[in-house]
């Protein structure tokens, strides 16, 4: 360890370490006030520097697998108290600096949209994965609401906004798989929520939490007058643990535009006989936006052969379908910016007898 790192650790912990890992310096003292939180934020910036240090390099340097500091095991478990069944939806799209200020990001979040409850330890670390392109207003509104809900629920979480580069049709299933892969490359997460950018939870009791079943959060939407869309609808916002998601091989990578991949994922759960459930507080407000094109004929062609390819189309075929352009640890979220290899996706579709 360098002399500078010893000094940093001494200032925060007032103790030295023989083998001195930066990660130990970050995590060995419970976060009990904002002063310590700011020290951790400064150290995080020093360690990552907007991805100048890659996750692999950081792991080699620290011997750990998380670019975010982890809570001390000595902290007491967090309690979820006084959660409101109905909350007021904040629908105003604020400028980024104003949004960061109103969320008190400098005190409640580390770069990358990472939050730890103060003075207690959440038993799970949650990754929120948001597939995204060209919906800045929706994103601002969602972040303004979602950070508040998750912090009220005493969650330890990081928000990953996975943005697909323009020039190729949007592929939501592939983008969700990329989010899962890239989030895991930066930290161990116990729980993964796949969250549409235009859906805002109406209840704090709709907890983002991994239990013994896959959980569908957004079963009832205000734009549908809270009627169930259709019986086996399993899209919008869902939460799964790592075991479930890897068992079903994630989402299909072969659905362009919006729609289809959610139904495909639900049938993967059924195929693997994995249990699922619906939130007891399933109401969401849907934000307005320009409608994306649906290609029903093409979707059905891909969906119709789902049972033939779920073992080979998914997480295990994601790697060659995208290129990571950049990773930015912004105040409110981690931006994962990627390019999709449309040619390779179309080649895989042809392999399964589907020509689009």
Image: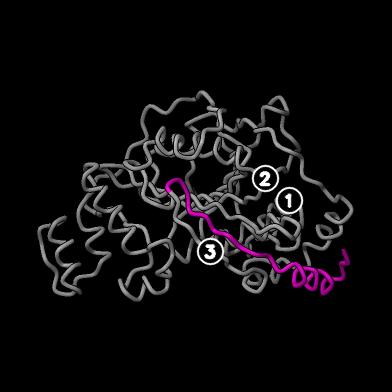
Q: Which residue is mark 3?
A: 326
| Residue at 25% in and 58% down | 27
* Spatial CA span between label 2 and label 3: 28 Å
* Spatial CA span between label 1 and label 3: 30 Å
Q: Earlier in the sequence, mark 2 or mark 3?
A: 2
Q: Is residue 256 above or below residue 31?
A: below
Of residues 256 and 203, the one drawn nearer to the viewer in this rendering:
256
Q: Is residue 69 above or below residue 313?
A: above
* SS label for mark 3: strand
Residue 60 position, x and y percent, is 35, 76
Residue 122 position, x and y percent, is 35, 47
Residue 175 position, x and y percent, is 64, 58
| Residue at 75% in and 49% down | 258
| Residue at 45% in and 45% down | 332
Q: Are marks 1 and 3 in contact (CB under 8 Å)?
A: no
Q: Which residue is mark 1?
A: 263
Residue 277 position, x and y percent, is 59, 43
Q: Which mark is residue 235?
A: 2
Question: Closer to us: mark 2 or mark 3?
Answer: 3
Magenta segment: 331-356
Q: Are marks 2 and 3 in contact (CB under 8 Å)?
A: no
* SS label for mark 2: loop
Of residues 25 and 278, the one drawn nearer to the viewer in this rendering:
25
Q: Is residue 343 left or right of residue 161?
A: right
How many numbered discs sit on the rendered protein?
3
Q: Is residue 17 left or right of residue 255?
A: left
Q: Is residue 323 above or below residue 108?
A: below
Residue 14's image quarter?
A: bottom left
The N terminus appears in which quarter of the rendering? bottom left
Q: Are marks 2 and 1 in contact (CB under 8 Å)?
A: yes
């Amino acid at each position: 360890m360098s002399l500078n790192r010893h000094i940093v650790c001494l200032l925060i912990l007032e103790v030295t370490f023989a083998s001195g890992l930066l990660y130990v310096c970050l995590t060995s003292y419970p976060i009990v006030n904002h002063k310590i939180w700011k020290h951790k934020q400064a150290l995080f910036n020093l360690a990552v520097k907007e991805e100048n240090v890659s996750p692999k390099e950081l792991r080699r340097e620290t011997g750990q697998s998380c670019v975010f500091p982890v809570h001390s095991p000595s902290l007491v478990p967090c309690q979820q108290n006084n959660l409101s069944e109905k909350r007021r939806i904040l629908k105003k799209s604020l400028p980024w600096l104003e949004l960061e200020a109103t969320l008190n990001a400098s005190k409640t979040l580390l770069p990358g949209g990472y939050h730890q409850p103060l003075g207690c330890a959440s038993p799970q670390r949650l990754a929120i994965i948001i597939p995204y392109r060209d919906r800045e207003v929706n994103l601002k509104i969602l972040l303004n609401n979602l950070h508040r809900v998750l912090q009220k629920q005493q969650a330890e979480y990081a928000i990953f906004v996975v943005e697909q580069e323009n020039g190729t049709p949007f592929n939501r299933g592939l983008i969700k798989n990329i989010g899962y892969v890239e989030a895991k490359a930066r930290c161990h997460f116990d729980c993964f929520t796949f969250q549409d950018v235009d859906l805002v939870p109406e209840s704090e009791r709709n907890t983002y939490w991994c239990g013994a079943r896959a959980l569908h959060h957004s079963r009832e939407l205000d734009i549908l007058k809270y009627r169930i869309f259709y019986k086996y609808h399993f899209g919008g916002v869902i939460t799964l643990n790592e075991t479930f998601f890897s068992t079903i091989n994630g989402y299909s990578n072969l659905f362009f535009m919006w729609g289809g991949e959610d139904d495909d994922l639900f049938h993967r759960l059924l195929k693997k006989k994995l249990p699922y459930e619906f939130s007891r507080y399933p109401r969401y407000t849907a934000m307005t936006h320009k409608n994306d094109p649906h290609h029903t004929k093409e979707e059905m062609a891909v969906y119709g052969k789902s049972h033939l390819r779920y073992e080979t189309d998914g997480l295990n075929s994601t790697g060659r379908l995208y290129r990571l352009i950049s990773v930015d640890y912004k105040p409110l979220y981690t931006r994962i910016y990627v390019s999709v290899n449309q040619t390779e996706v179309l080649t895989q579709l042809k392999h399964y007898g589907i020509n689009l």
